[in-house]
Amino acid sequence: MQINWLFKQCSIVTPSITTLLILVFNLNIACAEQSIVTKARLQTKKINIEITSHLGDTQSFVKGDVIKFLISLDIDAYITVIYQTVNQQFMQLLPNNKQKQTRYKSGLFIAVPSDDAAYRFTIAAPYGKEKVWVFASDKAIKPLPGKVLANGIRQVAIDIKTIKNIVLKNSKNYFGVASFTLSTSAR
């Protein structure tokens, strides 16, 4: 009702004021949507996440290197691990079809991939900047949209910002995010 009233009021004023009123109305909607996300962020407490590789904080890797990432949390939480390729594709490493349980205890190092995982990180072309993202929450998330590959991991059909928002909105009291950037090359 208020929207109809606003547009009826606009029809009796000059076009430039009509445009201004519509812009103000749209701005109010955008601010309300941002307020919801900001409110969710203010209500959640931060989960501190540490991420490194089994080779230490080395961030340069060459063809043939096999990498294992080590993740540690300061409180018990569910984690979602996303690998961002050089080509800006996103792979959901955890949870996956073979390893669905992703609630981990604080203070322990979580190896990704685990020794019994159906995949390994072996550096191969294409080379460049790649990233591993870890999202932590007090609630597990549903599988992200995408295609499940033969090794159980999921090629995700959304970007990292959307993934972050999904995990954040799903979180009840705790949320955290961290990333590890690595450079890969032929030698």
Image (cartoon, rainbow, N blue to C red):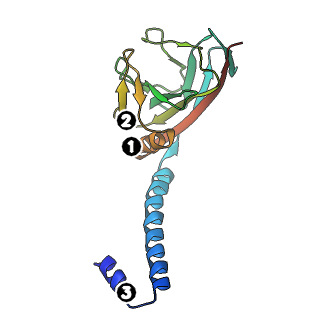
Residue drawn at 43 percent across, 90 percent down = 13
Residue type indicated by callout 3:
Ser
Q: x, y (%) of residue 149?
A: 38, 20
In the image, which disc is placed on residue 170? 1
Residue type indicated by callout 1:
Asn
Determine whether 74 is above or below 96 in the image. below
Measured in 3D between alpha carbons, the distance from the residue under mark 2 to the one under mark 3, in whole angstroms, is: 47 Å
Residue drawn at 36 percent across, 15 percent down = 150
Q: x, y (%) of residue 70?
A: 57, 20
The residue wearing badge 2 is 141
Q: Is residue 56 visible?
A: no
Measured in 3D between alpha carbons, the distance from the residue under mark 3 to the one under mark 1, in whole angstroms, is: 42 Å
Of the residues under marks 2 and 3, which one precedes in the sequence? 3
Between label 3 and label 1, give the one nearer the viewer: 3
The image quadrant where one finds the C terminus is: top right
Residue drawn at 43 percent across, 8 percent down = 116
